[in-house]
Image (cartoon, grey):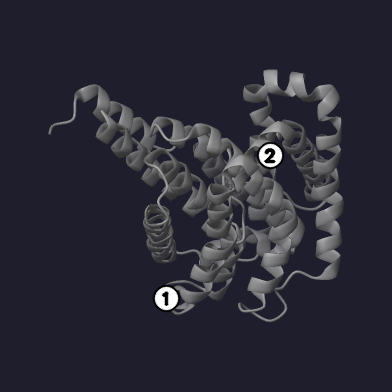
Amino acid sequence: MTVSSPSRFALLRRLTPDFFTSALMLAMVAATFWPAAGASARVLGHVTTVAIGALFFLHGAKLSGAAVKAGFTHWRLHLLVLACTFVMFPLLGLLLKPLALTLLTPELYLGILFLCALPSTLQSSIAFTALARGNVAAAVCAASASNFIGIFLTPVLVGALLMHGAAGQASSLDAIISFAQLLLLPFVAGQFARRWIGPWVDRHKNALRYVDQSSILLVVYGAFSEAVGQGLWQKLTPGTLLNLALFSCVLLALAMGATILVSRRLGFSREDQIAIVFCGSKKSMASGVPMAKVLFATSSLGVLIVPLMVFHQIQLMVCAVLAQHYGKRLD
């Protein structure tokens, strides 16, 4: 069966980097040639801290309590998504350690372990589930629950996983306390304030996403500014980046294959299977980059977030193709 020209163009648009991915690349280029240093780096650090607090405040305000409560009505699906996100991925990260250390540097492998501990994406999981004609309501609840639980569970998982990576890299008690102060408290405050600002936040969701993106860009620029001064591009050669992309493809293929197989074996409907695949096999850069800023030293942050950035783009490209495939099969 041939694919029509409009379908080919639509798929091509989904495979090309979006505006935000292009902005991330520009932030890396800017940090390479015009890195923040001295007083400007300190000011950038303070601005970034405020932006991250605002980001998680809005995350809390956007998360509807009704959506979380509704999730309990489909508890088998949500438990499977959570198990894929916070159990399967960390286990894959540990099991793939021999391959990772063959292809990647130890620092990049730590970034892989951090990636495996992150919650699922929110917006793109829902968007791809809708495109594939899956259970959108279940995807909303599953992705919301993943992000909510990730606020508490991710720093614990990071500490446990990094103990298997390299000595001295695990999250310390000070990092956990900073995480609670800078991320958890704003998130809880946002949930508390939702009763007053919730309708306004819901009406302006599209505009408020620029707060998310601006916060991430600030973190990426600051992290790469620091890393460039420590020889980042000597560590990230073209060959290393190619190996990282290859490893990310292997990790994503295993995760997606496992979610497809298990959801079928457990007897979920086709619509539920689609929601499980798109929510259980993805990782959130919107939550991951700010979390990394709090949990890791600035000197290592630049390298540690590179696996997340690469995996994020690959998952978007693969999910675009898969969503198109699901939709066409229904047609």
Q: Depth check: 272 or 175 in front?
A: 272
Does residue 118 appear to the left or right of 198 in the view shown?
left
Does residue 298 appear to the left or right of 11 in the view shown?
right
Which quadrant of the structure image shows residue 198?
Answer: top right
What is the spatial separation of the Cα atoms under label 2 and label 1, in whole angstroms?
38 Å
User: Residue 66 in the image: x percent, y percent?
Assistant: 70, 32
Q: Depth check: 208 or 26 in front?
A: 208
Which quadrant of the structure image shows residue 246?
Answer: bottom left
Local SS, label 1: helix
Q: Depth check: 267 or 238 in front?
A: 267
Figure check: 204 above or below 184: above
Q: Disc 2 marks which residue? A: 68
Local SS, label 2: helix
Type of residue at label 2?
Answer: Val
Type of residue at label 1?
Answer: Leu
User: Residue 79 in the image: x percent, y percent?
Assistant: 58, 53
Q: Where the N terminus falls, by quadrant?
A: top left
Residue shown at 71%/64% (left/top)? 299
Q: Say which mark, if any, is on residue 99.
A: 1
> Few, some or many C-alpha atoms within 10 Å of disc 1 (few <14, some 14-19, many ≥20)?
few
Mark yes or no: residue 229 visible: no
User: Residue 11 in the image: x percent, y percent?
Assistant: 31, 33
Tag in front: 2 or 1:
2
Figure check: 81 above or below 53: below
User: Residue 134 in the image: x percent, y percent?
Assistant: 42, 35
Instruction: State which tag comes first along the sequence, 2 or 1.
Output: 2
Residue shown at 40%/55% (left/top)? 256
Does residue 329 appear to the left or right of 312 in the view shown?
left
Q: Depth check: 120 or 140 in front?
A: 140
**Labels 2 and 1 touching (C-beta < 8 A):** no
